C-alpha cells in the first residue's frame, strides 16, 4: 500500500502524462489488462482514460485494475485513472 505522501508525489509526477489507454464501449477486457500490465512494467506510472460511451462505472474499473497483479490505483479524477506499480527491471521512480 502507498502512503499519502507517496500518492501525492505520484500524482504530481503523473500530472503531465497523457492517457496511454482508453476504455470504451467494450469495457475493461483481459487484453487491455494485459497491455496495462506490460506498460506498467516499462513505465511504472500511467494514466487510463474512461470514455463517455463506457457502460461500466469508473470506480468499478479502478477496483478491478487495482486487484490485478499488485497494481496501485493512485487516483481516480474525472474520467481518468492514475496507476502505479514498481517495475522489476526498469525501476525509474524513487518514492519518498
Image (cartoon, grey):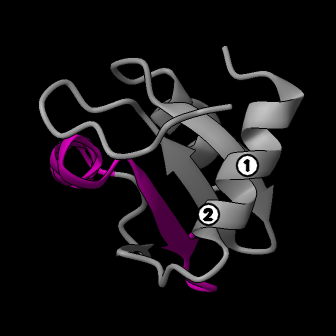
Across and down, in percent, residue 33 comes to 27, 44
Near-viewer residue (40 or 56): 40
Q: Nearer the viewer, residue 48 or 41?
A: 41
**Point 18% across, 53% down: residue:** 35
SS at badge 1 = helix
Q: Relative to 72, does residue 39 appear above or below in the rendering?
A: below
Residue 32 % position (x, y): 24, 55
Badge 1: how crowded within 10 Å, few (<14), some, or many (20+)? Answer: some
What element does badge 2 sit on? helix
Classify residue 57 by image quadrant. Answer: bottom right
Q: Are marks 2 and 1 in contact (CB under 8 Å)?
A: yes
59 sits left or right of 28 in the view? right
According to the picture, the residue beneath numbered tag 1 turns out to be: 9
**92 on left or right of 14:** left
According to the picture, the residue beneath numbered tag 2 turns out to be 13
Q: Nearer the viewer, residue 71 or 27?
A: 71
Q: Range of the magenta residues?
A: 29-54
Above/below status of 69 relative to 76: above
State yes or no: residue 31 in magenta. Answer: yes
Q: Residue drawn 61% across and 43% down?
A: 62
Find out whether residue 23 is within the magenta segment. no
Residue 27 placement: quadrant: bottom left
- Is the C terminus in the top left, top right, bottom left or bottom right quadrant? top right
Amino acid at each position: 500500500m502507498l502512503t499519502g505522501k507517496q500518492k501525492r508525489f505520484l500524482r504530481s509526477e503523473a500530472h503531465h502524462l497523457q492517457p496511454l489507454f482508453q476504455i470504451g464501449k467494450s469495457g475493461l477486457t483481459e487484453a487491455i489488462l494485459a497491455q496495462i500490465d506490460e506498460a506498467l512494467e516499462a513505465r511504472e506510472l500511467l494514466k487510463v482514460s474512461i470514455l463517455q460511451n463506457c457502460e461500466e462505472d469508473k470506480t468499478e474499473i479502478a477496483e478491478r485494475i487495482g486487484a490485478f497483479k499488485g497494481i496501485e490505483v493512485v487516483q481516480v479524477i474525472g474520467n481518468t485513472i492514475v496507476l502505479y506499480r514498481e517495475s522489476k527491471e526498469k525501476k525509474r521512480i524513487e518514492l519518498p
